[in-house]
């Protein structure tokens, strides 16, 4: 809600608190609840143009593997693109599609990441 109102920094603070809450509950980075909290924090960081922070947010869950890998990879792709690291952005976008858990998810990700998949490296 805060991000929708243009309060990106405030939304980031709330998303960081949500991640800390999930981690405090004892779940690891592979838990879907933690991975989703990392996804929303990373996405918020992309929106705030804090691309390295976005990469840092999603990296722990990507390192251990999680069922929400496609979403984390989409954040990773957008963050790499924001940093001007297009080869890595394209690779992360392709990994997002490859790890999609359904045709519908793959289709949505392909639309969201088309500008990266079609970009020249």
Image (spheres, helix red, strand yellow):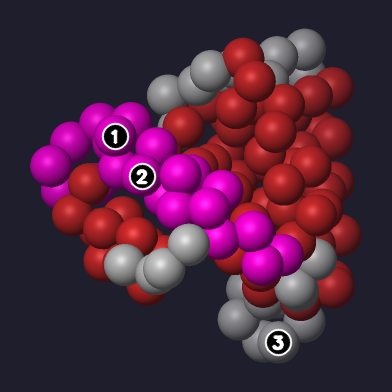
Looking at the image, which residue is at 53% across and 53% down? 87
Looking at the image, which residue is at 60% across and 27% down? 62
Given residues 77 and 86, the one toward you in this image is 86
Q: In this rendering, is residue 96 above or below 121?
A: above
| Place of residue 104 in the rendered image (x, y in percent of width and height, measured from the top left) | 15, 48
Is residue 41 visible in this depiction of the protein?
no
Q: Which mark is residue 94?
A: 2
Q: Which residues are magenta?
A: 83-105
CB within 8 Å, label 2 to label 3: no
Task: Tell me which corner region of the image, top left, top right, bottom left or bottom right, holds residue 78.
Answer: bottom right
Q: Residue furthest front?
A: 121
Task: Indicate left or right for 67 with 55 as reference.
Answer: left
Real-space Cα separation, disc 3 to disc 1, in angstroms: 33 Å
Q: Which residue is mark 1?
A: 98
Main secondary structure of the magenta stretch: helix
Magenta stretch holds residue 96: yes
Q: Residue furthest left?
A: 103
Looking at the image, which residue is at 24% across and 46% down? 105
CB within 8 Å, label 1 to label 2: yes
Given residues 5 and 116, the one toward you in this image is 116
| Place of residue 92 in the rendered image (x, y in percent of width and height, measured from the top left) | 48, 44
């Amino acid at each position: 809600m805060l991000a929708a109102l243009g309060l990106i920094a405030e939304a980031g603070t709330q998303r960081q608190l949500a991640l800390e809450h999930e981690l405090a509950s004892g779940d690891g980075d592979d838990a879907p609840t933690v991975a989703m909290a990392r996804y929303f924090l990373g996405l918020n960081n992309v929106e705030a143009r804090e691309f390295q922070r976005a990469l840092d947010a999603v990296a722990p869950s990507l390192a251990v593997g999680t069922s929400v890998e496609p979403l984390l990879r989409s954040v990773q792709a957008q963050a790499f693109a924001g940093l001007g690291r297009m080869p890595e952005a394209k690779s992360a976008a392709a990994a997002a599609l490859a790890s999609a858990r359904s045709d519908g998810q793959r289709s949505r990700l392909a639309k969201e990441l088309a500008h990266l998949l079609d970009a020249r490296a």
